[in-house]
Image (spheres, rainbow, N blue to C red):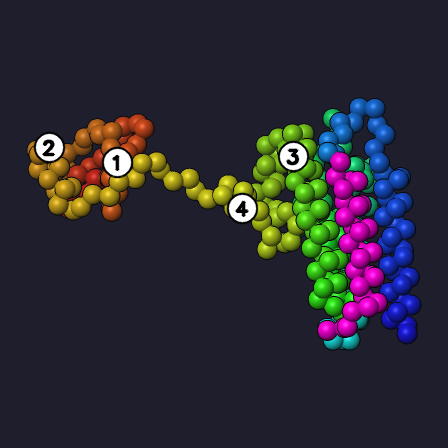
Amino acid sequence: MTLSIWWTGLYLGWVAGEIFIAIATRTRRADAKVQDRGTQVLLWIVIIVALTLSGWLQSILHHDMPHALRPISLALLVAGLVIRIAAILTLGRSFTANVATHAAQTLERRGLYRIVRHPSYLGMEIIFLAIGLHARSWICLAISFIPPTLAVLYRIHVEEIALRSLFGDEYVAYSRTTRRLIPGIYQPPSERRARRTPRLPHRRIISQRTRNSIARNALISPSQEIVCPLTFGGSGLLHSPSSARYSLFPSANLTRKA
């Protein structure tokens, strides 16, 4: 009974807090550039519909998850609230309910923002998970977690476009060292590709016999330096856009000298 009272009080407090945030922190600065693209309204609609449907189904569906999830869900709810509140307080006046930027804004790297780029949304995601687990139904968990998560991810996408436009290379560098939502786990495919070392173009594999033939026809000694527009690796021939200096060794491999 005590757990139910705590859950109800914290849940209603979260709902009231989100309503207050949506009204009180909506940007009204004359110099602000609003780039919300309707994500605030979309996020609210998805959350209200998903949680209302989940609450209704909770009352008519059979509980197919253990009762022990109730205290776990309460702990997750508390954790989500703490993370979200801490993230909002860290941003202070820079936090807005709608996506908006202004020229005097600075990139925040303190507190939770050293760990993830969007800790306030991480807190919200933990709250959605807590609500789904509290229902003790797989269907309710899917409804209360998946649609709001998709809406949050789209909101993050829109927000990051605005932040890259405002901070430029500074935000790009921040993105490379700090995960988007889940520390050490969640990294979008576009960021994984950006971290990879770019491959050299036009790779073509040639045999050892062909490399030996090239060396004989060139009539050059093993230690002679040449200027060649082609770079030879240990396993094949690479086309290079510029010439480079190489030394030829008896194995007919060309290795870069300097």
Which quadrant of the rendered structure holds the C terminus?
top left
Give the mark nearer the N terminus: 1 vs 4.
4
Under mark 3, the amino acid is Ile
Residue 197: give x, y in percent of width and height. 43, 42
Secondary element at tag 1: strand
Label 1 and label 2: CA atoms lie apart by: 15 Å
Distance from the alpha carbon under mark 1 to that under mark 4: 31 Å
Residue 166, quarter of the rendered image: top right
Q: Secondary structure at mark 2?
A: helix
The numbered mark, 3 or 1, whose residue comes first in the sequence reads 3
> What residue is pinned by disc 3?
161
Magenta segment main secondary structure: helix
Residue 256 appears anywhere in the view: no
Query: For residue 231, which numbered disc appears in the image?
Result: 1
Which mark is first along the chain, 2 or 1? 2
Residue at disc 4, secondary structure:
helix
* Residue 40 is one of the magenta-drawn residues: yes
Q: Which residues are magenta?
A: 38-64
Q: Residue at x 21, y 28 (%)?
A: 227
**Vertical comparison of 135 with 228: above or below:** below
- The residue located at (91%, 68%) in the rendering is 5
Query: Dot 3: what SS?
Result: helix
